[in-house]
Image (spheres, grey):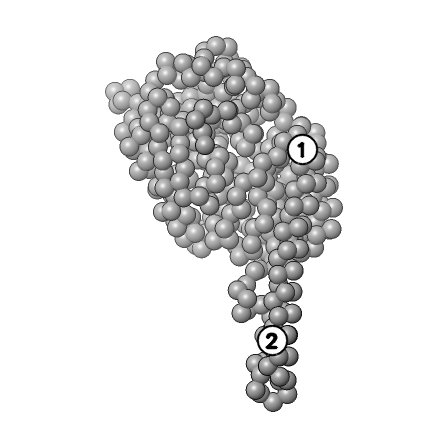
Amino acid sequence: MTGPATTGPAVTGPRRALPAERVALVDLLDRVLARGVVVTGDVTLSIADVDLVTVNLRALITSVSALAETGDHP
Amino acid sequence: MTEPSVVWTYAVTERDRPACLDGLEGVAGGPVRAVTAAGLTAIAGDVPAADFDAAALRRNLEDLGWLETTARAHHRVIEAVAGEGPVVPMRLATVYRDDAGAAAALAEHAGDLRAAIARTRARKEWGIKAYAARPAPPDRDAGPAPRPPGRAAAGSGAAYLARRRQQLSAQERARHDVVTSAELIHARLAGLAEQSRLHPPQPPQLAGQRLQMILNAAYLLADGQDGDFAAAVTELAGQHPAVRIEITGPWPPYSFAALPEAGQP
């Protein structure tokens, strides 16, 4: 799934669930990390019974943008 | 299994053991099974401790390739289980030392988990992303700038400044208009949904295109309401030509599964 182009239909998107492989990673991360992954720098994950892991996602954001630029991303 | 392992959890259901677990490949390529306690079932799987203990997770989650593979495997299992009935998805990387730890968590949060399952039963999440339909360029690129004063036929400096002011205020107005459109779109769609949740807009470089995202929202719709919702989106797109709208979904109810978290800011 690519972002909407500047031309074409004003509404885009599937009406049925996409296969897991075709869901945009950034949309998936919005949900499975349940926090502003793409805006805030840190995500605290509940590693229950083990630890709290705070992940700094600056590196992640950099690599997602690099991935987006290669154009091979769904 | 000789290698030390920890227990990755995907979702919680009220069913004993969803049939889809057989042959389902989970995170780290492992099998997926059920851990039952307090009348609830955690969908779980063993993953190698070497890659999934706290220190390893901290390292691995910074690795985009690892994160993508893991997030997609997590999602694939949740989707399969959600296809058979109500689930509460677990946040990515909710890992227990062993089955006893997962079972204890089920028992401890049983009330909240049941409430979350009830809240999202026979409902699905739909995503809406809305963009300003025209790229938002820096001011200096926003249309032809008035010619600076001092050239032939350019008029006075005061006239130049007046034109420039007008141009800038047109840009301001356009920005204000798309924000207003986003608010109206969200209000309308939230009215059709049982719950809604705003995610932060994705920056253009992450969304993979150059349009400015002005709305990134999730809506929880009762099954069978998606037709009305899609019709409303189409209508809204017609009413707001300066906005481009993208629908994603249906998703398992990721954005609506959060339990009350003690000590959460």
**How would you rate the neighbour count of disc 2 (Cα within 10 Å): few for under 14, some for 14-19, many for 20 or more?**
some
**Left or right of B257 on screen, residue B172:** right
Above/below status of B198 relative to B27: below
Query: Dot 1 lies on which element?
Result: loop
Residue drawn at (64%, 55%), measured in percent from left and top?
Answer: B176
Which residue is drawn at the image coordinates 40% and 28% (left, top)? A46
Measure how far apart labels 2 and 1 are at the Cα level.
48 Å
Q: Quadrant of the N terminus of chain B?
A: top left
Vertical comparison of B101 with B238: above or below: above
Tell which of A51 and B223 is nearer to you. A51
Kind of residue indicated by mark 2? Leu
The quarter of the picture where residue B86 lies is top right
Marking on residue B161: 2
Label 2 secondary element: helix
Contact between marks 2 and 1 (CB within 8 A): the answer is: no
Disc 2 with disc 1 on a shared chain: yes
Q: Residues within 10 Å of mark 1 (few under 14, many from 20)?
A: some
Q: Quadrant of the C terminus of chain B?
A: top left
Q: Position of residue B70 (x, y in %)?
A: 40, 34
Q: Which residue is mark 1?
A: B193
Q: Counting residues from the N terminus, which is met first, the one under dot 2 or under dot 1?
A: 2
Query: Quick one: which residue is furthest to the front in this view?
Result: B158
Residue found at x 53% / y 36%: A19
Residue lying at 47% horizontally and 50% vertically, measured from the top left: B206
Q: Nearer the viewer, residue A9 or B126?
A: B126
Q: What amino acid is found at the position of numbered circle 1 in the picture?
A: Ala
Question: Is residue B46 found left or right of B195 in the rendered image?
Answer: left
Residue B54 falls in image quadrant: top left
